[in-house]
Amino acid sequence: MFAVIMAGGSGTRFWPASRERLPKQFLAITGDRTMLEQTIARAECFAAPGRISVVVGRVHADLTKRVLSGKQVEILVEPRGRNTAACVGLAALHVKRIAAGGVAEDEPMVVLPADHFIADVESFTRTIRAAAEIARGGAIVTLGVAPDRPETGYGYIHIGAESGKSSAQPYFRVRRFVEKPDYQTALGYLSSGDYLWNSGVFIFTARTILQEIEACMPALHEGLAKIERAIDTPDYDAAVERAYDNLHSVSIDYGVMEKTSKPIYVLKADFGWSDVGSWQALYELRRAECDEQGNLSLGDSTIIEAKRNLIFSTTGRNVALLGVEDLVIVDTPDAVMVARLDSSQDVKRFADQRRER
């Protein structure tokens, strides 16, 4: 198998720890290693050395090379962000190049976001291998997560009847992909039992996805064809630059998954998945590390008569709390942010406001 890790995002949901030049995937917030390094380690469980690619924006290319120094990982650089369809297409060209003419030509490629958390890596690997068996036949496969709450921050997958089993794991026909719903709609999805959270993980062969891009996104296919002709030539970087100048920003979900005539199958994920989308999500993820009063301290802190707070510090300064509850305090060298923990989804407004100024 091949692994393609999408690391081109520059999110602001973990401001001020994450910035445009230091997005979430380069932070060590779920453990001792960055989220990108943890994703690479998971990919190494099913993809051999030399078969892992990381797609990253030019602004983060040098940082990625430093973080992954010494690893057998191919770093593919996008000149500018054009969403996940272009990212997947570019990676598929390079997978096709590596696999061409050999037994690996129809080996599946597993597309993974770089900034997600997986608790049970062994179960994750088993599910990926089961999905790969389906994808080898030319199918498009994704992973969905059974919802445990009416979450409005995730996209959903509407599933149909069971289509079969792969390595004893049932898989289902995807009826449709659904955008992030409002609360009442999400509540209905939860009670119906027919909807899964969209994990953003896809499995298919390079041949399959390139054929579907040609059928569903002809403009992207045209740009990719020009890039492909320049691979392994001195004109490659310039060809990518020219092609990306003319590409629209479209997600693989919208560009292909919602338009393809091919059947799409989904396996239910049961391995402790989280997209770690906010400081509150991080708090919930690491709740087991809280003290008796529910405080999670990721950095030097002194806490007196305070409850259910998250402290994150990268400065070495002591963060002192007295008598406060339900806050997130983030201390970085050039900014300190204090917010209610249950409002932490909105901290990106700080970055938006600073950018406007």
Image: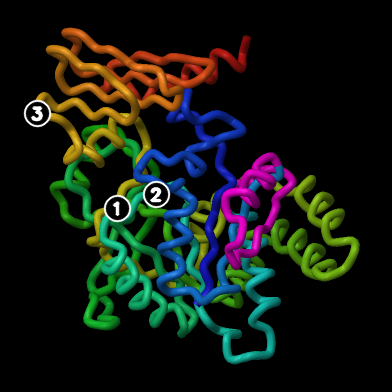
Q: How is the image coloured?
A: rainbow
Q: CA distance from mark 1 to mark 3?
A: 26 Å
Residue at 36% across, 26% down:
312
Q: Earlier in the sequence, mark 1 or mark 3?
A: 1
> Amino acid under label 1?
Trp
> Amino acid under label 2?
His
Give x and y (percent) for residue 139: 45, 77
Of the residues tagged 1 and 3, which is closer to the observer? 3
Nearest the viewer among 13 and 330 is 330
Residue at 44% across, 78% down:
135
Q: Label 2: which residue?
A: 116
Residue at 47% across, 18% down:
349
> Amino acid under label 3?
Glu
Dot 1, crowdedness within 10 Å: few (<14), some or many (≥20)? some
Dot 2, crowdedness within 10 Å: few (<14), some or many (≥20)? many
Q: Earlier in the sequence, mark 2 or mark 1?
A: 2
**142 over 200 or under it: above or below:** below
Q: Label 3: which residue?
A: 292
Q: Does residue 144 appear to the left or right of 254 in the view shown?
A: left
Q: Label 1: which residue?
A: 273
Q: Which residues are magenta?
A: 59-84
Magenta-span inclusion, residue 261: no
Please identify the residue farthest to the left as the structure is shown: 292
Nearest the viewer among 136 and 120 is 120
Q: Please say if the residues under marks 2 and 1 sit with CB atoms less than 8 Å apart.
A: yes
**281 over 207 or under it: above or below:** above
